[in-house]
Amino acid sequence: MGSGTIRRPVSGRMPHKIKLISLDWGTTSLRSYLIGTSGNILAAREGPYGILQVNNRDFAAALRQIAGDWLKAYANVPILASGMIGARQGWNEVPYAVVPSGLTDLHPVRFDGFEQILYIIPGLVYHGPAGVPDIMRGEETQVLGFGTNGIFLLPGSHSKWVHVQDNKIIWFATFMTGELFAVLKDHSILGRMMNGTKSDGDAFSQGVSRGTQTKSSLQALFSARTLALLGDLQESSVADYLSGLLIGAEISEARNIIDSPNTNITIVGGQTLSHIYEKALTICGLPSLVAAKDAAARGHWHIALASGLVAS
């Protein structure tokens, strides 16, 4: 097994019937799962084999590193993958499916030494009211693991808001909130006011409130400098204030897109970031809940069932 691979132990005996090998294959890491007859996760592994970490684009070798023993032991079990592995820089570029979509048009890939076919889930493209395209790869699979209807929020560098109806993604919107925070923190005058990393929940709440109330987030950004410069905000609190300001602006803009603004929002993501967004949504008066982990594997199971790749 390759260096850095994390194995999640399985409690109890491994059932004889394995139905699916599931791959959540992103830019920096690869998460693999064994899924049983009822869609339950029987084993999980994670390793540093993201598409930008694989030498010479030898993705077959990376897959053998993390799951070669699974491929041999379960030679008749289908393999389903999602994420950047289907991007232009990935194993095989898979065309985006057009929204609304249930993501059942899978792209088959054969690789040397194994009988199985690897099926890649397509990403999505959505043309909004102005005709401007929005895209995603990987998040769509995570969303479909948690419900057939509702609004879903996937926080991150490129935060996604997704509307699912009757098990199909109807629309989605991308916000570059996390990346913008990193750029402003590391490459702007605002970052020069940030001194220390002390967590300040009040400063974050203040930022969220201002971000949702202002009509111009570009103007509001400068307040992260002036409040600290004039002593109304501690320099150690500037980062939390700026984070809240950007997340508040994101929520305000997304709220204008949502048809039913009081709909419960399901947050799908890492624990820390999910709870940050949960707090921000509460400040904005929006109900939310944090989804369970292993979203991609859950989504793989639902897509495999819907596409006929596996039978229930």
Image (cartoon, helix red, strand yellow):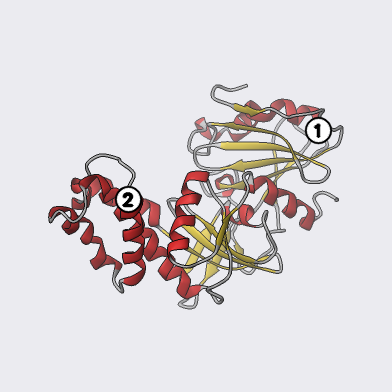
Q: Give the CA distance from mark 2 to mark 1.
A: 50 Å
Secondary element under disc 2, as helix, strand or loop, is helix
Q: Which residue is mark 2?
A: 240
Q: Work out which quarter of the rendered image holds the N terminus and state it.
A: top right
In the figure, residue 10 lies in which quadrant? top right
- Whole-percent x, y for residue 220 in the image: 25, 65
Q: Are marks 2 and 1 in contact (CB under 8 Å)?
A: no
Q: Which residue is mark 1?
A: 75
In the displayed image of the protein, which residue is found farthest to the front? 202
Task: Give residue 159's mark.
Answer: none
Secondary element under disc 1, as helix, strand or loop, is loop
Up the image or down, 157 lies above or below 262; here it is above
Left or right of 163 in this view: 181: left
Crowd tier of the residue under label 2, counting other residues whose Cα lies within 10 Å: few below 14, some 14–19, many 20 or above:
many
* Residue that appears at 69% across and 41% down: 22
Amino acid carrying mark 1 in the image: Ala
Crowd tier of the residue under label 1, counting other residues whose Cα lies within 10 Å: few below 14, some 14–19, many 20 or above:
some
